[in-house]
Image (tube, rainbow, N blue to C red):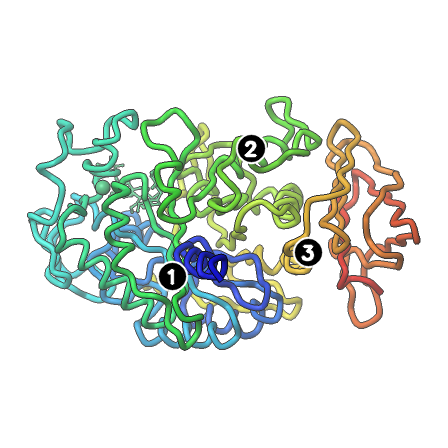
């Protein structure tokens, strides 16, 4: 009984670490800059049926609208207020999306921009996504309302009012990040407005929040806001469920602020994960795939139960934020499929898959001149819908990595092996490795410049399995390679380094 009470108590208290995904689903996808109407359709026609647990959406609240540059994607990281109309659609469309996704068991996580409002140079007028008037110069946002005394201008001690050094925690949290007007979050009034905004979304049925720019907010201020959040809507979630919180903190070491400062509040983005995995698959800095035998905490990443992991995100895929050149994106699709496959096969962390739009990448001296470009849009700046081609890929510049067969099938793999231990590791002391997940799944990578030809212990029951990378099981047929596992659990793998995708994955549900 005592144990039960203890478990029940912690079970409730700790649920901000739990994504509350349904039906044993384990991965979420960031549908970057998608319209609400398209996300609703995607939940029903693709994400639900293929076992995606949730969607991270772009910021849903009112944001600045910029002409120079023309409608950059990052205008949505410059809030003007908390009305719920944005480049992705209206409040009604947002509500409809949340409901329809919930009906098919796909959660919605909101990107919450609460550290700041728009840039100091954002001007004055109604150039905002719902048409609300504001004045950046006067620090006046009447639709909230926020005014001069709700900002940190006086508290920041740098000459420019900007963050000048990341070695000084007070600057990082009280000064302006790239000129963005910094909110005075120690104020009860400001905390209340932020909590109201988030509670409104909880009422509508969202499952949690990706909290933007947490490095720039004091953990105690964040804690005060989170404490005011209601439990999740019981129409969709268990009684007493706390909103899932994952906090954006870019910690690659060497700064005053660390990820650790935020563990007690919720999960935290593990940016070392994608940076290191990029080095490993690119074979930079002498990295080799076989060094990943102790991938996860063994690589000095944060504790497993605190981490949210991803290969790339909307910033570092275009040189924003940090993480640098090693980050692998859809532009390097062959490596990308392997890296995402590795992430999804490995038990560490809550996993997030990126889904991007293409832009006219133009790198000059290491910097992309077009890193600002917004999503595929009409000439009036409105975002284009996501058309689905007959072969199930997306059109009009939407990349839809989450629909790529190899990635989609690895999301299913992760669900099938959920809860199983990392097992049956094998490597060739170079860039060929294999591992299993108990007796439910097995994956083999060949990232060397020669063929792999080896008999391995898979830990799987005897049978013929369909490789879900080169193809997939369709009815009783396999459209890809077939792998025969003997009664001793052993199987023969042959992966040419010239294969379209030099890796193979089998799982309990791909058995023929
Ligand atoms: C510019 C200059 C300033 C100058 C100002 C004058 O850079 O020095 O003072 O003009 O007006 C955009 C522009 C930026 C501009 C700024 C304000 O890129 O040049 O300032 O707007 O007008 C995104 C983009 C930013 C963008 C911002 C707001 O990445 O480029 O800034 O949106 O539109 C750190 C943080 C981390 C952050 C990361 C990018 O610790 O938290 O940088 N990541 C998150 C989001 C990210 C977002 C923000 C935070 C801000 O993931 O997408 O920034 O909400 O590592
Ligand atoms: Ca701040």
Quarter assignment of residue 91:
bottom left
Q: Where is residue 308 shown, x and y percent of the image?
A: 48, 47
Choose the circle earlier in sequence order: 3 or 1. 1
**Other-residue count near label 1 (Cα within 10 Å), few / some / many at <14 / 14–19 / ≥20:** many
Q: Mark 3 points at which residue?
A: 417
Residue 50 located left or right of residue 175: right
Q: Marks 3 and 1, how far apart in space?
A: 26 Å
Q: Who's the residue at 47% across and 66% down the image?
A: 107
The vertical placement of 485 against 52, above or below, is above
Can see residue 363? yes
Marks 3, 1: nearer the viewer: 1
Q: Marks 2 and 1, how far apart in space?
A: 32 Å
Quarter holding the C terminus is bottom right
Choose the circle earlier in sequence order: 2 or 3. 2
Q: Name the residue under label 2.
A: 276
Q: Is mark 2 on a helix, strand or loop?
A: helix
Q: Is mark 3 on a helix, strand or loop?
A: loop
Query: Which residue is at the far front?
Result: 1
Query: Which residue is at the far top?
Result: 286
Question: Which is nearer the eye, 175 or 125?
Answer: 175
Residue 435 located left or right of residue 419: right
Q: What element carries label 1?
A: loop
């Amino acid at each position: 009984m005592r144990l039960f009470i203890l478990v029940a108590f912690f079970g409730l208290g700790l649920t901000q670490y739990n994504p509350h995904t349904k039906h044993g689903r384990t991965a979420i996808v960031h549908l970057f800059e998608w319209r609400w109407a398209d996300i609703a359709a995607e939940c029903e026609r693709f994400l639900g049926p293929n076992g995606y647990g949730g969607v991270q959406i772009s910021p849903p609240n009112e944001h600045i609208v910029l002409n120079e540059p023309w409608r950059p994607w990052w205008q949505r990281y410059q809030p003007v207020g908390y009305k719920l109309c944005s480049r992705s659609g209206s409040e009604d469309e947002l509500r409809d999306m949340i409901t329809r996704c919930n009906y098919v068991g796909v959660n919605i996580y909101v990107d919450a921009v609460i550290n700041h409002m728009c840039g100091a140079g954002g001007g004055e007028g109604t150039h905002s996504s719902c048409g609300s008037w504001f004045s950046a110069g006067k620090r006046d946002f009447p639709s909230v309302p926020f005014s001069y005394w709700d900002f940190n201008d006086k508290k920041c001690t740098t000459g420019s009012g900007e963050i000048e050094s990341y070695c000084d925690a007070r600057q990082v949290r009280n000064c302006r990040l790239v000129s963005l007007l910094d909110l005075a979050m120690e104020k009860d009034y400001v905390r209340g407005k932020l909590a109201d905004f988030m509670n409104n979304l909880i009422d509508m049925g969202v499952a949690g929040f990706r909290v933007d720019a947490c490095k720039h907010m004091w953990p105690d201020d964040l804690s005060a806001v989170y404490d005011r959040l209601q439990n999740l809507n019981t129409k969709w979630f268990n009684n007493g469920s706390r909103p899932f919180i994952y906090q954006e903190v870019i910690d690659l070491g060497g700064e005053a602020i660390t990820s650790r400062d935020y563990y007690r509040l919720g999960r935290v983005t593990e940016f070392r994960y994608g940076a290191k995995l990029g080095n490993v698959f690119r074979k930079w800095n002498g990295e080799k795939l076989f060094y990943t035998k102790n991938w996860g905490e063994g690589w000095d990443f944060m504790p497993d139960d605190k981490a949210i992991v991803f290969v790339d995100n909307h910033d570092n895929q275009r040189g924003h934020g940090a993480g640098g050149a090693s980050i692998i994106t859809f532009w390097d699709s062959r490596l990308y499929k392997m890296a995402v496959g590795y992430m999804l096969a490995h038990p560490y962390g809550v996993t997030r898959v990126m889904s991007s739009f293409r832009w006219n990448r133009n790198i000059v001296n290491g910097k992309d001149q077009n890193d600002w470009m917004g999503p595929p849009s009409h000439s009036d700046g409105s975002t284009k819908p996501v058309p689905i081609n007959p072969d199930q890929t997306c059109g009009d510049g939407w990349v839809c990595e989450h629909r790529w067969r190899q990635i989609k099938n690895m999301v299913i793999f992760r669900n099938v092996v959920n809860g199983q231990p990392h097992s049956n590791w094998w490597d060739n002391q170079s860039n060929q490795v294999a591992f299993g997940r108990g007796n439910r799944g097995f994956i083999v990578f060949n990232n060397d410049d020669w063929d792999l030809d080896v008999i391995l212990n898979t830990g799987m029951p005897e049978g013929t399995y369909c490789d879900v990378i080169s193809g997939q099981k369709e009815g009783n047929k396999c459209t890809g390679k077939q792998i025969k596992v003997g009664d001793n659990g052993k199987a023969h793998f042959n992966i040419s380094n010239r294969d379209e995708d030099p890796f193979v994955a089998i799982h309990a549900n791909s058995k023929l």
